[in-house]
Amino acid sequence: MLQLAGLVIVLILVGGGLALTGGPAAMHALPFELALIGGAAIGTVMLANSPAVAREALAGFVRAFRGARWKKSDYADLFTLTGGLMRAVKRRASWKTPRHAC
Protein backbone atom coordinates (compact mmCIF):
# COMPACT_ATOMS: atom_id res chain seq x y z
CA MET A 1 0.00 0.00 0.00
CA LEU A 2 2.81 2.40 0.88
CA GLN A 3 4.49 1.61 -2.44
CA LEU A 4 1.34 2.57 -4.35
CA ALA A 5 1.10 5.83 -2.43
CA GLY A 6 4.74 6.56 -3.26
CA LEU A 7 4.15 5.88 -6.95
CA VAL A 8 1.11 8.17 -6.98
CA ILE A 9 3.07 10.94 -5.24
CA VAL A 10 5.91 10.68 -7.77
CA LEU A 11 3.56 10.73 -10.75
CA ILE A 12 1.43 13.61 -9.45
CA LEU A 13 4.31 15.81 -8.35
CA VAL A 14 6.49 15.23 -11.40
CA GLY A 15 3.60 15.50 -13.87
CA GLY A 16 2.06 18.46 -12.03
CA GLY A 17 5.38 20.26 -11.78
CA LEU A 18 6.06 19.87 -15.47
CA ALA A 19 2.54 21.07 -16.30
CA LEU A 20 2.96 24.15 -14.08
CA THR A 21 6.31 25.11 -15.62
CA GLY A 22 5.08 24.68 -19.16
CA GLY A 23 7.41 21.80 -20.01
CA PRO A 24 11.03 22.90 -20.43
CA ALA A 25 12.93 23.95 -17.34
CA ALA A 26 13.63 27.65 -17.01
CA MET A 27 15.29 29.70 -14.31
CA HIS A 28 11.96 31.21 -13.19
CA ALA A 29 10.67 27.69 -12.60
CA LEU A 30 13.28 26.86 -9.93
CA PRO A 31 10.77 26.45 -7.04
CA PHE A 32 8.74 24.08 -9.19
CA GLU A 33 11.87 22.12 -10.09
CA LEU A 34 12.71 21.77 -6.39
CA ALA A 35 9.18 20.48 -5.79
CA LEU A 36 9.67 17.98 -8.61
CA ILE A 37 12.95 16.72 -7.22
CA GLY A 38 11.72 16.62 -3.61
CA GLY A 39 8.48 14.90 -4.54
CA ALA A 40 10.28 12.34 -6.66
CA ALA A 41 12.77 11.67 -3.85
CA ILE A 42 10.12 11.22 -1.16
CA GLY A 43 7.94 9.07 -3.40
CA THR A 44 10.90 6.92 -4.43
CA VAL A 45 11.89 6.35 -0.80
CA MET A 46 8.34 5.27 -0.05
CA LEU A 47 8.16 3.12 -3.17
CA ALA A 48 11.49 1.33 -2.79
CA ASN A 49 11.51 0.52 0.93
CA SER A 50 9.43 -1.16 3.58
CA PRO A 51 7.31 1.14 5.76
CA ALA A 52 9.74 0.91 8.69
CA VAL A 53 12.77 1.77 6.56
CA ALA A 54 10.91 4.59 4.79
CA ARG A 55 9.85 6.05 8.14
CA GLU A 56 13.44 5.96 9.42
CA ALA A 57 14.80 7.49 6.20
CA LEU A 58 12.30 10.34 6.25
CA ALA A 59 13.04 10.95 9.94
CA GLY A 60 16.72 11.11 9.02
CA PHE A 61 16.00 13.76 6.39
CA VAL A 62 14.19 15.84 9.00
CA ARG A 63 17.11 15.49 11.44
CA ALA A 64 19.56 16.51 8.69
CA PHE A 65 17.72 19.77 8.03
CA ARG A 66 17.20 20.56 11.69
CA GLY A 67 20.77 21.80 12.15
CA ALA A 68 24.08 20.89 13.68
CA ARG A 69 24.19 18.99 16.93
CA TRP A 70 27.58 20.43 17.90
CA LYS A 71 28.55 24.04 18.45
CA LYS A 72 31.61 25.97 17.28
CA SER A 73 33.21 25.58 20.71
CA ASP A 74 32.93 21.79 20.43
CA TYR A 75 34.93 21.85 17.20
CA ALA A 76 37.51 24.18 18.76
CA ASP A 77 37.91 21.76 21.67
CA LEU A 78 38.33 18.86 19.25
CA PHE A 79 41.05 20.68 17.28
CA THR A 80 42.83 21.60 20.52
CA LEU A 81 42.79 17.97 21.63
CA THR A 82 44.02 16.75 18.24
CA GLY A 83 46.84 19.32 18.25
CA GLY A 84 47.89 18.28 21.75
CA LEU A 85 47.95 14.62 20.77
CA MET A 86 50.01 15.35 17.66
CA ARG A 87 52.54 17.36 19.71
CA ALA A 88 52.80 14.50 22.22
CA VAL A 89 53.46 11.98 19.45
CA LYS A 90 56.04 14.29 17.85
CA ARG A 91 57.94 14.69 21.15
CA ARG A 92 58.44 10.94 21.53
CA ALA A 93 61.54 10.42 19.43
CA SER A 94 61.44 6.67 20.05
CA TRP A 95 58.59 6.36 17.56
CA LYS A 96 60.60 6.64 14.37
CA THR A 97 59.91 5.19 10.98
CA PRO A 98 61.90 2.00 10.34
CA ARG A 99 64.64 2.30 7.69
CA HIS A 100 63.07 -0.30 5.42
CA ALA A 101 59.84 1.72 5.26
CA CYS A 102 61.50 4.81 3.77
Image (cartoon, rainbow, N blue to C red):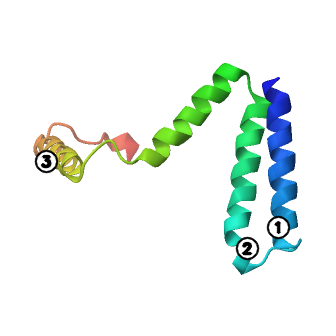
Q: Nearer the viewer, residue 93 or 25?
A: 25
Mark 2: which secondary structure?
A: helix
Report the residue at 53% width, 35% height from top. 60
User: What amino acid does circle 2 point to?
Assistant: Ala
**Of marks 2 and 1, which one's residue comes earlier in the chain?**
1
Is residue 80 positioned above or below 62 on the image? Answer: below
Identify the mark at residue 20; answer none if there is no mark: 1
Distance from disc 3 to disc 2, alpha carbons, whole Å, reads 54 Å
Q: Is residue 75 left or right of residue 52?
A: left
Mark 1: give few (<14), some (14-19) or many (20+) Cα within 10 Å: few
Mark 1: which secondary structure?
A: helix
Observer-side mark, 2 or 1, equals 1
Judging by the rendered image, the residue that carries numbered circle 2 is 29
Instruction: Point out the image quarter for the N terminus.
Output: top right
- The quadrant where residue 30 appears: bottom right
Q: Nearer the viewer, residue 82 or 53?
A: 53
